[in-house]
Amino acid sequence: MMRRDVKNLGHIFEPDSIAVIGASPTTGKLGHVILKNILDASFQGKIYPVNPKYKEVLGLRCYPDVRSIPGKVDLAVFAIPAEVIPGVMEQCGRKGVKGAIVLSAGFGEIGRKDLDEKLSKIVKKYGIALVGPNCLGALDPSRRLDTLFFPFYKLGRPRIGDISFVTQSGAVGSCIVDMAAHFGIGFAKFVSYGNGLTIDEADFIEYFGSDPHTKQIILYLEGTRDGKKLFEVLKRVGKKKPIIILKAGKVGGASQAALSHTGNIAGNYTAYQAAFRQAKVIEVNTLAELFHVVNAFSQPLPKGNRVAVLTDGGGLGVLSADAIEAEGLSLAELSPATVEAIKDVLPPYGNVGNPIDLIADSGPGEYKKALDALLADKNVDSIIVIVLFQAPALDSSILDIVVSASEQGKKPIFAVAVGGDYTNESRKVWDRYGIPSYDSPDFAVRALKKFTDYSLLSKKKK
Amino acid sequence: MMRRDVKNLGHIFEPDSIAVIGASPTTGKLGHVILKNILDASFQGKIYPVNPKYKEVLGLRCYPDVRSIPGKVDLAVFAIPAEVIPGVMEQCGRKGVKGAIVLSAGFGEIGRKDLDEKLSKIVKKYGIALVGPNCLGALDPSRRLDTLFFPFYKLGRPRIGDISFVTQSGAVGSCIVDMAAHFGIGFAKFVSYGNGLTIDEADFIEYFGSDPHTKQIILYLEGTRDGKKLFEVLKRVGKKKPIIILKAGKVGGASQAALSHTGNIAGNYTAYQAAFRQAKVIEVNTLAELFHVVNAFSQPLPKGNRVAVLTDGGGLGVLSADAIEAEGLSLAELSPATVEAIKDVLPPYGNVGNPIDLIADSGPGEYKKALDALLADKNVDSIIVIVLFQAPALDSSILDIVVSASEQGKKPIFAVAVGGDYTNESRKVWDRYGIPSYDSPDFAVRALKKFTDYSLLSKKKK
């Protein structure tokens, strides 16, 4: 059973049947990749290829048009030229289709306002939820729904999780999806809405706001047509769930580029910034930072800005301390009990300050004792644990020790590990357990700063 | 034949024979890992394990002491406790050993100034070049020299290249070495000097300055004992070769941490900054940025700050344009010839501005034509090429097309590709060909900014 919701969006994300308009048996064609991906994702509902040229595509019976499909169709995915879409959408409307994803470009973004108007009119008449045109469509790993036209071997798909991601740019969207898959980060839902002709970013945020599987929302935005609506939704939904926004097209030239590629107005960045601040959403400035901050939210919120740094590599501790002071966080003054506990595990030349330098001879046991002390220390709000996986004294049990510390749920733990293959594979284990891990100390610190600011701001809200 | 050089450093980097003091057959022991790594690196000279407890270690004859080694010893690597090192160093001096690497900690950094004094006196008496104590020692891939005590499976070793790297911190050093190996970046030489008792960072920079295999020098520095000497060397060597510096321990707490872990004074950062500016070295602020800028130097220097951005993902172009304007670079105004050439390859909805949005339907051929036009365009000083490897229209020939464009050596080309496994593997090909590649557009832009500043400053010097 489908939930009734914002603009019928359930038909997009929770369909029981999908028609692929323009399905093709030719490898490389959009209508082929789409159908193949829906199959490769193991979608469990009915799948209807539609194309008058073929009787069968990829082993499925192919229908000449939407009308001839025997059963009900929840979602139609369009992989045909813009020019012919309004006609087929009309047929979909008559058939009772309530969800449509139009991947094709060639609408308002290249000046074809006439096609925009035709399409809007039809979807409004029939109450069809329309994603696009000029987009990647939708992803819901829990429902094995996947309309992205990027082959699986080139673009990984994330596992099931609680992050939902709304993106204006398909390219940026696919990069984030691919990175999430790479690091084992889970997604609840993903939507690339492209031109956003009748359903825009605000509608999706509203929908994800009331989606029980979504705990955190990400938005990549270049511009909006209805700033007032967007900011009202951000304010309302932001009270329930953290919203992280990457606003691109901030300045002259960039705004121009943003304008032409999806046909949206990037607008005045200062106004956006003010509105974001008011809505208490978290703004990030780069693609890398977006990813760094997203990872943080699987950790408990910190109660303050006092950070303890635990490391087996002195230099990495120094770099972290630099970043902590540069970002305006504070190095925690460890309690006497913590100092004692750590003295116990340190050789005479270890550093009992903060950063705590366990030196490269330390093994997993030393980390465990130090982490226990830091978790119990009332002077410490959050912990950055740096692990030099390369050190001979460490074996892979350090992974479990950090996971166990994190699972106590007492304080946020951010991990740092910098290196090559062995280190990167090790870090992935943490990502899987929801421990954010970073490959440069400053990345961890900057993400922790955003996370801490959000936490302290949320407290004030109450 | 060994070159005569700064403080006999040839005995460290170009030894014909190595003694491993404290060699051990026990897996996990420092004296075991060191010897194993020297063997695993396939060092071609003589290798002499030294330990009175054993007759044989890892299949090699083991000597009870340095005196009993039959042949000449160029380099002695110490993996024994600090307390007993001065005695053995005295024996080395008498034996005629001229190079020593002391990996062991337990000297001045924990207050044992007495051991420092003893050791200095001995190495000065015999003219021994001493690296350390409390360090990782040296690496020279072209000579298969490797005294790092991190196992090969945990820490990758870089291939032969032209970058030499001096690091005060062993941890930071090993991270960079490991990352270089991961991305296929080549190193000429690497040295971790730890406490730098008698040979400091300035000596190594001087040595690398006159090393014919070194084209670029990297320094990770927390503090120095002799600022005047360092800055004079930086000024002199900086005229011949680019020097990239990451200065850590900038602020209060961080300086403290830096002080205790290698026993050096981190000092006043403002003074360092002024001196760096004067010496025209390139200062980076984070470990990630260090790596990002290092990669740039395999490209030709740009003649100005006008950047062209070529992309098949609109959003990534917008993010790049944002970063270009934020960093104070400028988006090139394409010449009419370039605009014409690009119009030719674009569908009607492509963007002929800068960023040039080839849209996701473009294949390698479109990239080639656009790159040719940009390389010929007098209004363009450097090129950022963004590739969405995930796009169905691209095959791996895009790699060669960018490599061929780069090999013309006309303008710097920086590549951006963001994603997961497939994308990261593809990027590695570029790194191998000396094309710097980045996984966030802002990383490329920031590195290009530093590279451009360096280029324009170097021109002024002449």
Image: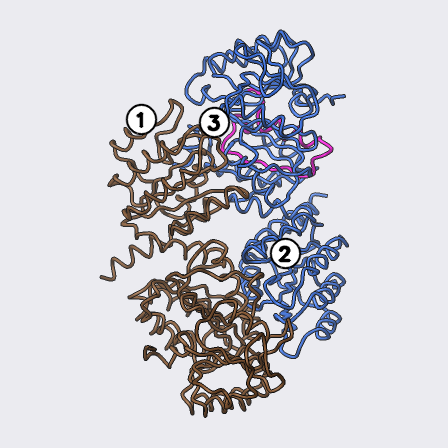
Chain colours: A brown, B blue
Q: Chain of mark 3?
A: B
Residue under label 3: B264
Residue type (three-letter) at the residue carrying disc 3: Asn
**Front of the two marks 2 and 1:** 1
Instruction: Label 3: state its secondary structure.
Output: loop
Residue type (three-letter) at the residue carrying disc 2: Ala
Q: Given contact means CB atoms under 8 Å apart, are the residues at marks 3 and 2 in contact?
A: no
Q: Is residue A297 left or right of residue A81?
A: left
- The reply to whether label 2 and label 1 mark residues of one chain is no
Q: Position of residue B147 (x, y in %)?
A: 59, 26
Q: Residues within 10 Å of mark 2 (few under 14, many from 20)?
A: many
Which mark is drawn over residue B415?
Answer: 2
Q: Position of residue A303 (x, y in %)?
A: 27, 50
Residue A108 visible from this viewpoint: no
Residue under label 1: A344
Residue A383 found in image quarter: top left
Q: Quadrant of the C terminus of chain B?
A: top right
Q: Chain of mark 1?
A: A
Q: Within the magenta stretch, is there residue B214?
A: yes
CA gap, disc 2 and disc 1: 49 Å
Q: Is residue A343 left or right of residue B21?
A: left
